[in-house]
Image: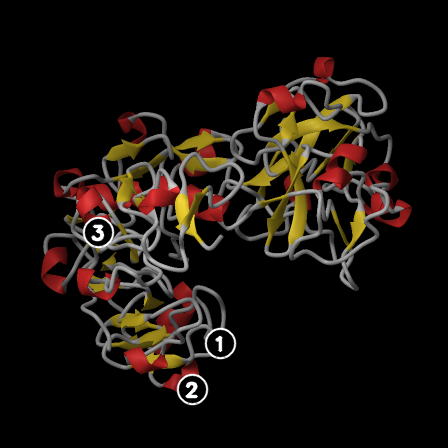
Amino acid sequence: MRRYLTPVLLVVLLSACRPPSSASSVDGPTSADSGREALADAGHRDLRARDVSADSPGDLPQTDQGSFGCDPACQALGLHLCVPQGNSGCMECVVNGHCKANPYAFGPHCVADLGVGQCLCASDQECASSPRGKRCDPATHRCSCSSDSECAAPLSVCAPSFGRVTSCSAPCTSDADCAASPFKKCDTVTKRCVQCTTSADCTSGVEPICDPVAGLCGQCASDADCKTSPVGRSCQQGRCGCTTDGHCSGDRLGGSQCVLPQGFCGCGADAHCAGNLFGPRCHHANLTCSCLADADCSGNGAYTSCALPYAFADFARCELPCVSDAQCLADHGAAGTTWALPFCQGGKCSMCKSSADCQSPAAPLCNTATGRCVSCLTDAQCPATYGPRVCHAIKGCVECFADSHCQPPEADHDGAICRLASFICGCFLDADCKGNRHGPYCFAAYHECSCTSDQDCTVPPYTTCKKPYAWANHMRCAEP
């Protein structure tokens, strides 16, 4: 079954902790830097959406603010959990005080992620006295460990906690001891609560192989599992990828260049796609080889159809031409499933023939010209909940796909330039921030307009220059 995902789109800095329970051209961006910009930028925009809570409830669910003890019923679900979350279980915190009072918290700061409070750290220093570990993991902002020697009773083993982050945890002798752990299987040899001990424990089709050393399910446990992966022929922490260009030689890869630090085979220029069976053009938003038309696929043997590789892809690749709906069903899944391309039209597997085939509320309309389910066909169908939006033929409702969409400057745009890697407005020079309500200077690290003092804030009512979130290293004009 030929079903490949794009190598990488986003880097997520913080993992949510939840208890169990008129359309544009279809051509992609053409700047080689734009894809790298998207990768580097994703983390910042994710972080900005989560603001450290002060010792007050803010916008999070109300709770007893008289004391910061943890609810025993919540800690029975997970030692790091502390506060009831309505009728949907428990979360780690509502205010910083919950994090400081809970000895099992992963950090001292209460950070709101879509209304779910998480206890996170900002530096190794904040983990110096944490029983969870002495290092603040830079990817998840959770105190972590690297070996059992860094842990002490009652959290005496260094075990998986969030993704591949390991933190000091309680030991186990049976699965029953793992009820309060993020992972419910006990490795009785290492006494760690893990996700798996054999591949039979890995029931997800996305990560079907158990790495018994890490105790986690993944795409691979060794390089041998990556022999046909389009993102690289080396197994890196449970995922196929690369560390050198040598891992990017072979058939049906995203490109001949190992894109670092992300670690996948891709491209930065069309030269990295010479002779590539996916196509001769580097799609710079995703840093993967692609095609724009069937003509790009000549000389590719049987792969002569420039078509979507999976549903909702924003690029096309040279694929085998289809001859029937049955072939598309076999290769790409039935209608209604996440990556389905069940209809054969003009030799290409497509998502839809009419809007009746589009079952996702996020993309209920069929663009019959492209065979894609989309969120919009015209600008008028894009809600203005978060500011003006325009309709892009592939991406749907976006902030922009042309600089003109980033005007006027006093609107809630981050700059006057449309950054095609992410379809959001931003800046590259101070000139791009002239008249911007967030400030007159371009903060280069994040491509956002910013300020240095209240005197820079000249667009009422945004007259106060301050940090947009507690961990920010820049300031923006805001309401007092």
**Image coords of residue 344 (percent x, y):** 30, 76
Neighbour class for label 1 at 10 Å: few (<14), some, many (≥20)? few
The residue at the point 40 percent across, 55 percent down is 462
For the residue marked with disc 3, what is the amino acid?
Lys
For the residue marked with disc 1, what is the amino acid?
Pro
Residue picked out by circle 1: 361
The residue at the point 86 percent across, 30 percent down is 173
Given residues 237 and 208, the one toward you in this image is: 237
- Whether label 1 touches label 2, CB < 8 Å: no
**Image coords of residue 94 (percent x, y):** 72, 49
Q: Measure how far apart labels 3 and 1 are at the Cα level.
A: 38 Å
Which part of the image, by quadrant, shows the N terminus? bottom left
Given residues 409 and 119, the one toward you in this image is: 409
- Whether label 3 touches label 2, CB < 8 Å: no
Between circles 3 and 2, the one closer to the viewer is 3
Q: Is residue 300 left or right of residue 88?
A: left
Residue picked out by circle 3: 434
User: Residue 412 appears in which quarter of the rendering?
Assistant: bottom left
Q: Decide which of tag 3 and tag 1 comes sooner along the chain.
A: 1
The circle on residue 356 is 2
Describe the element under mark 1 as helix, strand or loop: loop
**Image coords of residue 194 (percent x, y):** 71, 35
Q: Measure how far apart labels 1 and 2 are at the Cα level.
A: 12 Å
For the residue marked with disc 2, what is the amino acid?
Ala
